Amino acid sequence: MSVVLGIDIGGSGIKGAPVDTATGKLLEERHRIPTPEGAHPDAVKDVVAELARHFGIEGAIGVTFPGIVQHGRTLSAANVDKDWVGLDADALFTKATGQDVHLINDADAAGLAEARFGAGAGVDGVVLVLTFGTGIGSALIHNGVLVPNTELGHLWLRDKEAEGWASDRARERDDLNWKQWSKRVSTYLQHLELLFSPDLFIIGGGVSKKADKWQEHITLERSKLVPAQLLNDAGIVGAAMMAQEGGRGQDGQTRKTSAVKPAEKAASKAQKK
């Protein structure tokens, strides 16, 4: 059993737990600390260090971030302090904790976890994980390999950013019932179908808990759609998966983090024959 600490940075709280990366199970109850007001890097690093001390798990630590993460640097800051832009966050957190820390975009982390241990387990081809909340996060996975930082919530759709029109926040803001909101989501997903031809859509975020209210109203041309399974644990699990694989290779490039084990792929292909 390989135990890795995963930490998920959210807008209101920063939570973590040790993860058995062989099963995707949390080994202790999540510990949550409120996100410091403004989410400045120095304040957030102190919380991450506190969580590391709380659990006392040796080895690498995986941390999610609500923005673009490339080669350990955070390159966007939509809902956090602008000092994150261009920051070597891997180095900041590594120094703060005294352990190797590897960051990953929060939606990418959720996507990895869902593809390996959740609704996408064993699925070959293209899996597109979308998290509907304040915005729309996305994770694109092909045959178990993540294509990082897709940011598909920012696609331009009907003269608007998609997440400003079809997110869960937009549903609440515009006082839409679930059927009305589902019509917008269907338009968005059909656009993604044309661009990526996914075999499977996995819908996460807070709306995944209420799939019975909207799923039957979603209309797609050819892709299958299912709600996410891991819910609030997905970011923690995905962060731990990334950290276990080292986050970056010796050349500084982000490693391809596989969401599906080779043995699982072989078994799946054998079943199809």
Image (spheres, rainbow, N blue to C red):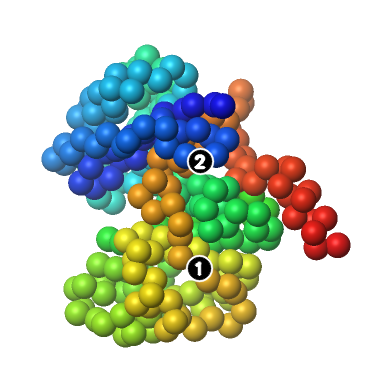
Q: Which residue is mark 1?
A: 226
- SS label for mark 2: loop
Residue under the point 32% across and 85% down: 180
Within-10-Å neighbours for mark 1: few <14, some 14–19, many 20+:
some
Quick one: 106 or 115, which is closer to the camera? 115
**Earlier-in-chain disc, 2 versus 1:** 2
Within-10-Å neighbours for mark 2: few <14, some 14–19, many 20+:
many
- The reply to whether the C-beta atoms of the residues labelled 2 and 1 are less than 8 Å apart is no
Residue under the point 64% across and 46% down: 260
Q: Is residue 9 left or right of residue 248?
A: left
> The disc labelled 2 sits on which kind of residue?
Gly
Q: Quadrant of residue 222?
A: bottom right
Q: Quadrant of residue 37?
A: top left
Image position of 90 with respect to 219: above or below: above
Quick one: 104 or 156, which is closer to the camera? 104
Residue under the point 86% across and 62% down: 273
Residue under the point 80% across and 59% down: 271
Q: Quadrant of residue 193?
A: bottom right
Q: CA distance from mark 2 to mark 1?
A: 19 Å
> In the rendering, at what x and y percent does residue 4 appear?
47, 28
Q: Residue furthest right?
A: 273
> In the rendering, at what x and y percent does residue 264 appear?
71, 47
Q: Which residue is mark 2?
A: 24
Q: Is residue 86 visible?
A: no
Q: Is residue 210 left or right of residue 101?
A: left
**Tag count:** 2
Image position of 59 with respect to 6: above or below: above
- SS label for mark 1: strand
Q: Is residue 27 left or right of residue 255?
A: left
> The disc labelled 1 sits on which kind of residue?
Val
Quarter that holds the N terminus: top right
